[in-house]
Image: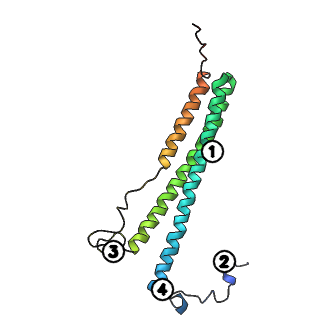
């Protein structure tokens, strides 16, 4: 029977590599700081990407809903097409809301990592950088807007559902004087 090996085991010296015993892997304070800085910068970039991604999702979903609402308000929808149209819109809504929800969960993980890095750098400790206060504000203050996006997605879906089942907006003829 052939033994399975990890893809990186072909590297020379893998079997004997031990970070604690390796003099080149000395984790001096400077190297620890560089590792924290690299971790912080990588996750700051990830947070920027998540923010852009959320905005693109919401910015794509909303025009689709507006276009669909405009089309439905012009003449309504035949009864036999109402349920399939609602199902299609519900699937688009579910996908958009799920993506935003997953992004919000990942954003929370990134914030937790930022808190750990800030703790390691003593940013929350009073008196370590400033005389009588901490350098960073309270870590519980978060500005997560994922729930706001999800609220907008749900409101747009409900508006489309109303248009589907109301038969569109009734056109009132103008009264001539």
Outermost residue on the top side: it is 177
- Quadrant (top left/top right/bottom left/bottom right) for the C terminus: top right
Q: What's the distance in space between the residues labelled 4 and 1, CA to CA? A: 46 Å
Q: Quadrant of residue 142?
A: bottom left
Could you tell me which residue is drawn at 48 percent across and 85 percent down? 27
The disc at residue 165 is none
Q: Which residue is mark 1?
A: 60
Identify which residue is drawn at 29% across, 74% down. Answer: 127
Q: CA distance from mark 4 to mark 3?
A: 23 Å
Is 118 left, or right, of 87 in this rendering?
A: left
Whether residue 95 is visible, yes or no, is no
Say above or below: 43 vs 24: above
Residue nearest the viewer, comparing 166 with 6: 166
Tell me the residue that label 3 is attached to. 129
Q: Please identify the quarter of the rendering in which residue 130 is found.
A: bottom left
Q: Earlier in the sequence, mark 1 or mark 2?
A: 2
Find residue 146 and report its horizontal and vertical position in percent.
50, 49
Residue 93 at x, y = what percent?
59, 41
In primary-sequence order, the first of circles 2 and 3 is 2
The residue that mark 4 highlights is 27
Q: Position of residue 7 (x, y in %)?
A: 68, 77
> How many C-alpha atoms fall within 10 Å of the one at disc 2: few (<14), some, or many (≥20)?
few
Residue at 60%, 48% in the rendered image: 57
Which residue, given by chain and number where applicable, does mark 2 sit on?
A: 6
Q: Residue 2 appears in which quarter of the rendering? A: bottom right
87 displayed left or right of 105: right
Mark earlier in primary sequence (4, 2): 2
Q: Secondary structure at mark 3?
A: loop
């Amino acid at each position: 029977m052939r033994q399975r090996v990890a893809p990186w085991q072909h590297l020379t010296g893998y079997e004997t590599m031990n970070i604690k015993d390796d003099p080149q892997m000395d984790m001096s304070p400077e190297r620890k700081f560089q590792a924290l800085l690299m971790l912080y910068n990588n996750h700051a970039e990830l947070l920027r990407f998540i923010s852009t991604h959320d905005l693109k999702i919401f910015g794509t979903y909303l025009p689709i809903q507006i276009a669909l609402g405009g089309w439905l308000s012009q003449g309504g929808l035949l009864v036999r097409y109402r349920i399939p149209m609602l199902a299609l819109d519900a699937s688009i809504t579910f996908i958009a809301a799920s993506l935003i929800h997953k992004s919000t969960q990942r954003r929370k993980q990134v914030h937790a990592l930022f808190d750990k890095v800030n703790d390691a750098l003593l940013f929350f400790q009073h008196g370590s950088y400033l005389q009588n206060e901490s350098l960073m504000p309270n870590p519980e203050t978060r500005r997560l807007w994922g729930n706001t996006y999800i609220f907008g997605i749900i409101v747009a879906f409900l508006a489309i559902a109303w248009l589907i089942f109301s038969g569109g907006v009734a056109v009132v003829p103008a009264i001539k004087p």
